[in-house]
Image: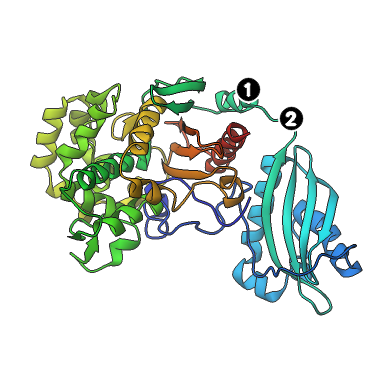
Amino acid sequence: MSSQITPPTCSPAKAGVQGARSPTRPWPPAFAGALLAIWLALFSLPAFAQPTPAYHSRAQQLVRILSAPGQEADFFSDLFLKAVPTEQWRAVAADLRQQNGKPLALGAVRQDGATAGQVEIRYEHATIGFILVVAPAAPNRVIGLRIVGVARANDSMDKVMAELAALPGHTAFAAAKLTDAGPQLLHARAPDAQMATGSSFKLYILAEAARAVAAGDRHWSDVLPLAHKSFSGRLMTYPDNAPMTLHSLAAAMIAESDNSAADSLLWALDRDKVDAVLAETDHASPDKALPLLTTAEAFALKMPVNAPLRARYAEASPAARRALLGDNAARLAPSAIDIGSIAETPTAIDQIEWFASPMDEIRLLDHLRRQDGEALAILAINPGIAPADAKRWAYLGYKGGSEPGVIAMNALARAKDGGYYAVSGIWNDPAARVDDAKFVALMTRALNLLSE
């Protein structure tokens, strides 16, 4: 596994830092879940027959540094710790232990050059491979460390399904092979359950953008204003009405889950046309899902001060909801949102959300697969799981969503034999925040097993 990872998207928990719990940049650092990788240098040099004593010593010490906090300054170089502070490292090591058990022993060590090589660490429930890079001069402190693979012992899709079922709250999952005749379900848990999906709704906006381009109504190079900035995300700091291309807005919306990009596109493409994608993709419960809210509207409705309006909205028909949104536009604007009132605990995730089932998401991914190829390229910018795992596939596109009490992950994958697959998993808990790291690890395992 490798590089910083991609959390799914759309909660206000880290507004201004990660963009409504959606990352404001691909691969944000230090997201836990056995997926972190940090590397500074790796050179292609002739392989050494045996690791040097200094390299082997650092490999042995890696077991200890992964096992418990302490002595990081003796193990890592100042350069490494400047990039990855001690507390950040400790959080990553703790998450590896949570996901894989205790580190037990050093496995194979292969030195590929004067300073770099590959090291295996055997945990209780997995073997994790690292690229380890040490400084060439004594005391040979570690300047680079990268997770390049996790192999769980005797893993199976049945085990993944059982662990999903054991999570608190409600979970749903579906994995399907995509064929000319439609998705063929391979593995499932409550695949038709309507769940809160967070920023997964941005896939519908991408689908309408791709349709408009294919029809000649739009071009990816069209310039659109950043006219509807939301309450968080990278583009929130851009000038009002900054000129953006359709492509750059779509890329920010999908790869970074930028809420300002999503809201601007939803209005520019026409919300009614985006809503129509639900019918085109056979969404099973459009009356529950429509209209698709902007991110600003959704989180404004979640605020305690808007509880009466929220209750009316949740009980209304789609047509009545549209009227309520229009009549209350001022109180649902980004400037009216108090993030602190909704950031810490699940808020109305059964009332105000973007609702879909895993099978709805799979049909949507299959729809995107058949559309404009540039949409697939945008989906692949941020694959959602660590790059080393993503490379098990010839292609991997991803969009997820999260907020307190909600996480969803949706992947479109092409196997190396050319076959397409789609995977969607959702976890909702109205009583407590969900464990994002645990869910990412489960979904990564599911994708890895499906790739075999």
Foreground pick, 55 / 299: 55
Tell me which amino acid carries mark 1.
Asp
Foreground pick, 402 / 414: 414
Coordinates of residue 99 in the picture (x, y in percent):
67, 41
- Is residue 395 left or right of 373 when viewed as pictured? right
Could you say whether the residue bearing mark 2 is in a helix, strand or loop?
Answer: loop
Coordinates of residue 50 in the picture (x, y in percent):
90, 62
Residue 141 placement: quadrant: bottom right
Could you say whether the residue bearing mark 1 is in a helix, strand or loop?
Answer: helix
Tell me which amino acid carries mark 2.
Asn
Q: Is residue 147 above or below residue 73?
A: above
Residue 281 placement: quadrant: top left
The residue under label 2 is: 154
Residue at 38% over, 35% down: 365
- Is residue 297 left or right of 21 when viewed as pictured? left
Residue at 75% over, 37% down: 125
The residue under label 1 is: 158
Residue at 42% over, 31% down: 430
> Disc 2 to disc 1, how far (Cα)?
11 Å
Coordinates of residue 194 in the picture (x, y in percent):
36, 24
Pointers 2 and 1 in contact (C-beta within 8 Å): no
According to the image, what is the colour scheme of the structure?
A: rainbow
Q: Is residue 379 above or below residue 188?
A: below
- Is residue 38 left or right of 50 when viewed as pictured? left
